[in-house]
Amino acid sequence: MDTRARIRVVVVDDSALVRGLLGEIINRQSDMQCVGAAADPLAARELIRSVNPDVITLDVEMPRMDGIDFLSRLMRLRPTPVVMVSTLTERGAEVTLRALELGAIDFVCKPKIGVAEGLQRLADDITDKIRIAARAQVRRLAAAAPLEPGGMPAAPLGLTSMGRLSTEKLIFIGASTGGTEATKSVLTELPADMPAILITQHMPAGFTTSYAKRLDSLCHIRVKEAVDGERLLPGHAYLAPGGLHLSVERSGANYVARVRDGEAVNRHKPSVEVLFESAARVVGPNALGVMLTGMGGDGASAMRAMRDAGSYNVCQDEASCVVFGMPREAIARGAAHEVLPLARIAAALITRLKTTVGSHTHRI
């Protein structure tokens, strides 16, 4: 491949070993090149100015200026696709989620021990995420929306109680790259008595606990990791635990969560396909499906099955997606009733629920 067409990557990491390994992994690919490496953000700043990379890999915790401070400045002044190199710790998970809020495209986990062997095993994952980042839509970091004094977002306007409908309907959300922020955007706009919501976000084990806690602190509904066999209640959102599949089952008059190990589906565990297939099979016309930003086609076929079973489905539009892959595939298969900007999806769900009061078996 012509060098000029390669993805130009800068590696920022305080470990000389990691810098060398990442550079080697990147340079083994025919479509990318490591054009520089820096041991800390201050050195990286000058390097980025001089080589103008397409993608940056950035360590979360470094000396002189931590990765979060650097990322915040970068996304305000020179927005560039960033893949975070995180650690599999609670602190690492919280910092990584903050990085995604600030505009990082995705993250990979640095092994705690056996770094050299671990990074080599992750080579495909690392390079796949660099490719996705190179094509992703990057937005300049804007000021955060104001919060009420207690730290909660202002209550959504114009909402009435969902009433009995909350126990009849279920909402299903699938997301991948860019989805942590997209899902947050939808959930924070929903009132406290929404129907139960089930979410599959592609995320490794060790990160979903922190993500659920973060969402729970920001939303009017309660957000938690799903537990196998628990009853699904209105006003609650249930997140697939990292590394496990989430689906829904019926138990008498109730819906319950099913959390299971198993083979990866479409290369993912948790998989949106698994969740949406159960929605089509178990919930049918009482389901509302939402496909948010993400790479690939996980969940597209099952979302079409949901529509065929009578559900109502919304896909995020290309302009507001970080990566349009998953919504594009679902739309191509005829799964979507509406294709909407992210900012309009929560309102569309509320409107749809209000218009179906008393007609919970209505098919489109």
Image: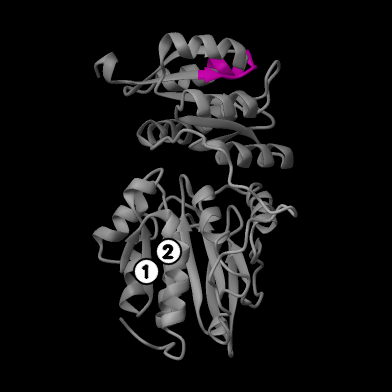
Residue 290, labelled with which disc?
2
* Most foreground residue, 303 or 293: 293
Q: Secondary structure at mark 2?
A: strand
Tag 1–tag 2 contact (CB < 8 Å): yes
Residue 269 visible here:
no
Q: Secondary structure at mark 1?
A: strand
- Give residue 108's position: percent from left, percent from top: 55, 35
Tally the numbered discs: 2
Stretch in magenta = 11-20
Residue 285 vs 125, above or below: the answer is below
Residue 341 vs 323, above or below: the answer is below
Residue 258, labelled with which disc?
none
* Most foreground residue, 232 or 87: 232
Q: Quadrant of the C terminus?
A: bottom left
Residue 23 vs 156, above or below: the answer is above
- Give residue 155's position: percent from left, percent from top: 62, 63
Task: Report the residue at 42% width, 75% height from top.
Answer: 352
The residue pinned by badge 1 equals 313
Residue count near mark 2 (Cα–Cα under 10 Å), binned few <14, some 14–19, many ≥20: many
Q: Amino acid at mark 2?
A: Val
Q: Quadrant of residue 68?
A: top right
Separation (CA) of disc 1 from disc 2: 6 Å
